Image (cartoon, rainbow, N blue to C red):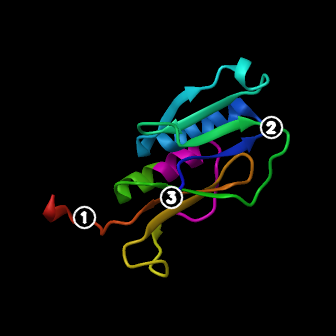
Amino acid sequence: MIDHTGIPVADWEKSKAFYDAALAPLGISMLYIVPEQYTGGQKVGGYGRTKPEFWLHHSSEVGPGRHYAFSANSRAEVDAFYASAIAAGGRDNGAPGPRPHYHEHYYGAFVIDPDGNNVEAVCHHPEVSQESR
């Protein structure tokens, strides 16, 4: 339904470092930085797996209250996202774990980014047991 989205960030380098670290375990990276000649001199870059879908843009107008959830292929990816995001300066907003009040297999982790946004990694697949691997 949504092709892409973006958020304003107060400190481009700090936010880029945070998202580089937090999204890497999910196989997501910065795929494109728009040349500043097309952005009025502002830093703008897009993250994704195969095409830019989540954009950062430098702005003086940032604020908390936004929520972004990134899909994970496994619960281990959710765990790695959380650990990487916390290590990169994110604040805990819900450690990795099941959230059965959303649905039976919902497994997510929540972190507050440098601008106060609630960032999540979520896996919707059932837990894979060691025996079935």
Between label 1 and label 3, give the one nearer the viewer.
Answer: 3
Q: Locate residue 129 relative to residue 72 in the image: left or right.
A: left
Residue lying at 50% horizontally and 58% vertically, measured from the top left: 1
- Please state the horizontal and vertical placement of residue 82, each as a whole percent of the image: 51, 53
Q: Name the residue under label 3.
A: 1
- Please state the horizontal and vertical placement of residue 126, each as a whole percent of the image: 30, 69
Q: Locate residue 127 relative to residue 94 in the image: left or right.
A: left
Label 3: element kind: loop
**Residue 78 or 47: which is nearer the viewer?**
47
- Residue stretch rendered in magenta on the structure: 81-96
Nearest to N terminus: mark 2 or mark 3: 3
Q: Specify whether residue 18 is painted magenta.
A: no
Label 2: element kind: loop
Q: How far apart are marks 2 and 3 (CA)?
A: 26 Å
Q: Mark 1 points at which residue?
A: 128
Q: How far apart are marks 1 and 2 (CA)?
A: 42 Å
Q: Seen from this angle, which residue lies furthest bottom? A: 101
For the residue marked with disc 3, what is the amino acid?
Met
Nearest to N terminus: mark 1 or mark 2: 2
- Within 10 angstroms of label 2, few (less than 14), some, or many (20 or more) residues? some
For the residue marked with disc 2, what is the amino acid?
Ser
Residue lying at 44% horizontally and 79% vertically, measured from the top left: 100
- Please state the horizontal and vertical placement of residue 11, each as a whole percent of the image: 76, 35
Residue 50 visible:
yes
Q: Distance between the residues labelled 1 and 3?
A: 29 Å
Q: How many labels does the image show?
A: 3
Between label 2 and label 3, give the one nearer the viewer.
Answer: 3
**Residue 88 or 48: which is nearer the viewer?**
48
23 lies above or below 1: above
Q: Mark 2 points at which residue?
A: 59
Q: Locate residue 118 relative to residue 26 in the image: left or right.
A: right
